Amino acid sequence: MACFTVPLAEAIVVTAIRHTVFAKKSNEARFVSVKNQLETLEKLLFGGSFLLAAEHIYHGEITLYPPFLTALSSPEEISVMLHEMATVGTGMAVLTTAVWAIIWGISAFFKKRKNRRLQRTEMPCA
């Protein structure tokens, strides 16, 4: 029903954080990687939310006229919608962020490993 709103809200928060925290520090080399990784998280969250919203529109759970969410048309369905947002929506947002963090960690590990190899090969021979 409205599970896509939780990852969408997280994407908006990540976007706001990226724009405010990295606005002045955008040219420093150590912040460029973090800024790019946050941009990747944004794309994952916005893209997933868009696809879920499209799927909900296709199934008639979202309409283009008020109340927009069909679950808001009756008071009984509001609690079901909120429960779905709390369980399914939060689960999707947490899982997406966890997968992003794992991929970022693996990427950082291999970058450090590559840098160590380069440092060893650049050492002068005595």
Image (cartoon, helix red, strand yellow):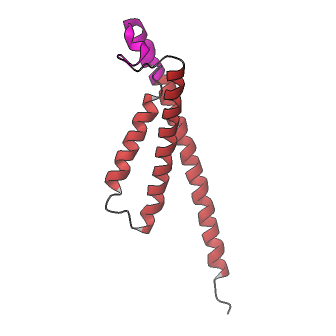
Query: Does residue 73 show up magenta in the picture?
Result: yes
Work out whether residue 108 or residue 7 is closer to the camera in this orientation and state it. Answer: 7
Q: Residue at x 35, y 48 (%)?
A: 17
Please tell me how many numbered marks the rendered image carries: 0
Q: Where 51 falls versus 61 (above or below)?
A: below
Taking the image as shown, residue 126 lies to the left or right of residue 34, namely: right
Taking the image as shown, residue 1 lies to the left or right of residue 124, namely: left
Which residue lies most toward the bottom here?
126
Work out whether residue 109 or residue 126 is closer to the camera in this orientation and state it. Answer: 109
Where is residue 29 shown, x and y percent of the image? 44, 68
Q: Where 119 falls versus 15 (above or below)?
A: below
Magenta span: 65-85
Query: Does residue 88 show up magenta in the picture?
Result: no
Where is residue 110 shown, x and y percent of the image? 63, 61
Work out whether residue 52 or residue 24 is closer to the camera in this orientation and state it. Answer: 52
Q: Residue at x 39, y 67 (%)?
A: 27
The image quadrant where one finds the C terminus is bottom right
Q: Where 107 falls versus 75 (above or below)?
A: below
Q: Residue at x 52, y 42 (%)?
A: 44
Q: Residue at x 43, y 29 (%)?
A: 5
**Residue 122 falls in which quadrant of the image?**
bottom right
In terms of secondary structure, what is the magenta stretch mainly? helix
Where is residue 16 shown, x and y percent of the image? 34, 46
Q: Where 26 falls versus 124 (above or below)?
A: above
